[in-house]
Amino acid sequence: MTVQPAESLSGLDLREEIDRLRKERKVVILAHYYQKPEIQDLADFVGDSLELSRKAAETDAAVIAFCGVKFMADTAKILSPEKIVVLPDLEAGCSLEDSCPPQKFRAFREAHPDHIALTYINCSTEVKALSDVIVTSSSAETILEQIPEEQKIIFGPDRHLGAYLNRKFGRDMLLWPGVCIVHEAFSETEMLKLKAQHPDAPIAAHPECPAHIIDHADYVGSTSGILQFAKTMEGDTLIVATEPHIIHQMEKAVPHKTFIGAPGADGNCACNICPYMALNTLEKLYLALRDLEPRIEIEEDLRLAAKKSLDRMLEMAAGTIGKGDLGRA
Ligand code: SF4
């Protein structure tokens, strides 16, 4: 269906209309921390990939409006197939998903038959179906600790997250060469200049950052972990090395503290704003609720194959599968 241009919506109070439609159509609006503040503020729940996956699996709403990127909306549909799942802009992709075409991933797996595939949730449904266990940045450490040390592992598609886990846990996982274009854009030189201006401010970094950024961090963790660190740290200023829209939740939670986004290459570019997440707007969300389009549809055999690795993540993240309980996809 054709999305109407924003100007044809002039005159509407979009917040009021979204509110009306969400009640009429029994919609739950889920938003990732990297969404624009105006979308975060009207969402029923704001969270990271693991939290949003759990919400999608649990909700009794008839419709899930997913304000995030496509692999996240796909995950919601995989876990809640009976729900209508809409994504305001179907073009909201992810550089990590793009880096890992399923046919190449399949060939990589076949070339390493003695390895299991531990795969970051930022991938296509097809790649999830080819994987043994999915992880998010908040569940990766808990899950990796449950896998026997002698088990050989392929980790994809984020090579920086994989390298961070290898360093932290002394593992030797084979890494797929994908990167997040947003976290890749942080500049070490500019960050050190910023640190010199705020010598007492700790640095919190997402593990999708390259090692030369992580090496300077006082805290490394998922978006929800960084948010928690912001709330509980002792100082009053924090340098934040992840997508800067997370700062909105920090400022709401602890308004007396100061949060400074880590800089990109020239010190003040917007290169660490995720261009895919930014495609979602209030206008597109309103249209998605009005028309219940664009919808996520997934062929049933593929969905069931992908669900296995996601279910395993949800179980292992809750600590309900013990060591040595991993099989092949
Ligand atoms: S921030 Fe990076 S990993 Fe997240 S959706 Fe954007 S490109 Fe993908």
Image (cartoon, rainbow, N blue to C red):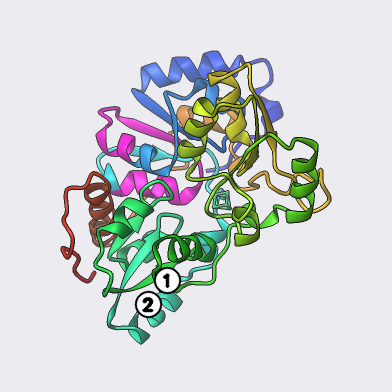
Is the C-beta separation of discs 2 and 1 under 8 Å? yes
Q: Residues within 10 Å of mark 1 (few under 14, many from 20)?
A: some
Q: Nearer the viewer, residue 308 or 161?
A: 161
Q: Position of residue 57 (x, y in %)?
A: 27, 39
Q: Position of residue 16 (x, y in %)?
A: 53, 13
Asked if residue 106 lies left or right of residue 217, the reply is left
Q: Position of residue 137 (x, y in %)?
A: 43, 50
Residue type marked 2: Arg
Q: Residues within 10 Å of mark 2 (few under 14, many from 20)?
A: some
Can you identify the residue that label 2 sits on? 106
Residue 36, by quadrant, is top right
Is 279 within the magenta? no
Ligand 1 within 8 Å of disc 1? The answer is no
Magenta range: 54-78
CA–CA distance between discs 2 and 1? 6 Å
Residue 48, by quadrant, is top left
Viewer can see residue 147 = yes
Q: Secondary structure at mark 1?
A: helix
Can you identify the residue that label 1 sits on? 102
Q: Name which residue lies at 30% across and 55% down.
A: 143
Q: Position of residue 196 (x, y in %)?
A: 79, 42
Is 74 within the magenta? yes
Which quadrant holds the C terminus? Answer: bottom left
Q: Secondary structure at mark 2?
A: helix
Residue 219 is labelled as none
